[in-house]
Image: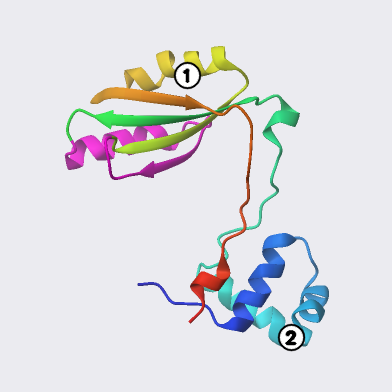
Amino acid sequence: MMGKLTAGEARLLDILQQDGRITNQELAERAGMSASPCWRRVQALQDRGVIRRHVTLLDPGKIGLQVIAWAAVQLQCYKEDEVRRFEESVAGVPEIVECYSVMGESEYVLKVVVPDPQAYDRFLHEFLFKVPGLVRVRSSLALREVKYTTVLPLQQALA
């Protein structure tokens, strides 16, 4: 089991999840601490891997990526070499923005982002259907976004 967060760490992370570009000085002020200890705590969170990286979140629709699809993938057999081969196949595909190994009818669920349904069809035929060991793909396309957040529920992670 991974380590839990202290209340102070959770406070810093709550603020950073809302605005990753905040200055250390402003972060310290909003968290109610001085700048040096604030910086050290953030560095420690980065060193522990709690903070993975700093990124800019884009709106896919505003850049022409209108279709978000989930592909539930079933493999012929769930053996180590087949799993490795599948995971290596999907790792470098830019349209696949998330991939999860799951329990249930499927072995994997992929989140795929493409411009339109035709592009998703091409993705299926030109890539996914050609992956060795693939038996079935069940797709769902998003109609509209109801909720999207990258903010984690930190109260659940307190020590």
Q: From the viewer's perspective, is residue 74 above or below residue 159?
A: above
Which residue does the numbered mark 2 point to in the structure image? 36
> Which quarter of the rendered picture does the N terminus lie within?
bottom left
Q: Residue at x 37, y 31 (%)?
A: 72
Q: From the viewer's perspective, is residue 5 above or below residue 87?
A: below
**Could you tell me the amino acid type at mark 2?**
Ser
Q: Which residue is drawn at 31% across and 34% down?
A: 86
Label 1: state its secondary structure: helix
Instruction: Give the camera-side residue of 140 and 132.
Output: 140
Give the distance between the C-alpha atoms of the residues marked 2 and 1, in whole angstroms: 49 Å
Percent from the top left, x then y, of residue 114? 58, 24
Q: Which mark is residue 123?
A: 1
Q: Quadrant of residue 20?
A: bottom right
Q: From the viewer's perspective, is residue 18 above or below residue 40?
A: above
Q: Which residue is drawn at 70% across and 48% down?
A: 56
**Could you tell me the amino acid type at mark 1?**
Phe
Residue 99 drawn in magenta: yes
Q: Quadrant of residue 107?
A: top left
Q: How many labels does the image show?
A: 2
